[in-house]
Image: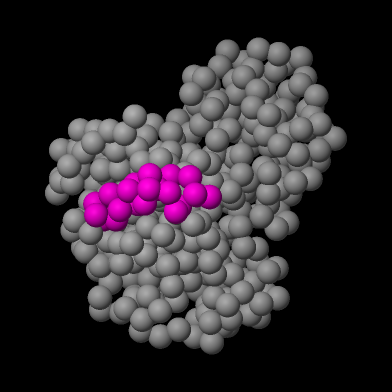
Amino acid sequence: MTRRAAVTGDNRDVRTTQRLVVDPERLETSEAKEALERAAAILCAGGLVALPTETVYGLGANALDKEAVKRIFRAKRRPAWDPVIVHVAAESMLEGLAKEIPERAHRLIQEFWPGPLTLLLPRSSAVPDAVTAGRPQVGVRMPAHPVALELIRRAGVPIAAPSANLFGHISPTTAAHVLDDLDGRIDAVLDAGATEHGVESTVIDPCPCPMVIYRPGAVTAEQIRDAAGPVEFFVASQEPANKPRRGLPSPGVGLRHYAPRARLVLVEAPLDELGARLAEAARDWSGERLGVMLPAGVATPGELAQARIYAWGRWDTPKELASRLYSGLRALEAEGCSVILCSLPPGEGIGAAIRDRLRKAAKEK
């Protein structure tokens, strides 16, 4: 059932959140058009709409409306020092967001847009400080999801959209996940089913040489190197403080993110040794309500007989592991697990993104 809510200037006044169902393969239907028009009208009025992308669900607001962007931060309980990404539906929309676009950025756009790649570009004066946490660059991407693209087109404005969850919690890959965190705090969610990739976009600064990846994602370093030249991963000079004095240089840098409310314990071993290593870790947490992200092909050891098991996916198919990562963590959290054991996959390709998210999620509060 669709629940109605009025657009409001204060997130605390949103009592119900509209759930607008859209079939991404049938955008020509009257139902889809009505849902998209409703969502676009909310955005144009300064409200908040959670929208599906090919990575995770994002919490959207008009990126050029500073008060609307501030509502994102209030709804998510997100600190102002953490910048957000702006989503566009056409390369021409960059003209109002970026002062310049380097040649390497043009090559990346040609190769990967629409897609899960965010470019950090010199911001124009039209971009509110709230979007960039006061930093001189703005993160921009063009999502490869038909519902997201159509919503941006209908709204006619770029959409600022971090993940649609409470700050630091597991990112949402379904509309149900969004409502678990934000029901009553936002105006609407466009429900288009589960997302494809399951982890957030790669964030890269294409301006220096070599280019710098601030957050690994579905577009890998190898793909970027082949398309546009040398690239390296960002390495912080020191661990960011819990309350940084200035804005972070990029979304997803440092701090505890993507985390379940349960304690997350990481286990690293070759596939043929994972069962034994998980059993060893389970003995260290006896007395806890255990959950396990268990890859396919790993037998359940006796020590995990009473644990809640999530069938994670095939170890040799990292795209599958990525797409099921957040759903698995949320499922085990919903079963009341106090400790979740999770294997660290190899770091090649999208495995680098999975390892990044798990290591941030496992940090101490």
343 above or below 58?
above
Q: Residue at x 24, y 47 (%)?
A: 74
Q: Is residue 52 left or right of residue 209?
A: left
Q: Is residue 348 left or right of residue 205?
A: right
Rendered location of residue 144, percent (x, y)? 53, 60
* Number of numbered discs: 0
Whether residue 291 appears in this view of the structure is yes
**Residue 34 is a magenta residue:** yes
Q: Residue furthest right?
A: 272
Q: Residue at x 54, y 75 (%)?
A: 109
**Residue 337 is a magenta residue:** no
Quarter of the image that includes the C terminus: top left
Q: Residue at x 36, y 41 (%)?
A: 20
Q: Main secondary structure of the magenta part?
A: helix
Q: Residue at x 36, y 51 (%)?
A: 33
- Residue range in magenta is 22-43
The residue nearer to you, when weighing 113 against 248, is: 113
Quarter of the image that includes the N terminus: top left
Whether residue 239 appears in this view of the structure is no
Looking at the image, what colour scheme do you see?
one colour
Q: Is residue 44 left or right of residue 264?
A: left
175 above or below 86?
above
Rendered location of residue 120, percent (x, y)? 45, 72
The residue nearer to you, when weighing 1 against 89, is: 1
Rendered location of residue 363, percent (x, y)? 50, 41
Rendered location of residue 27, percent (x, y)? 45, 52
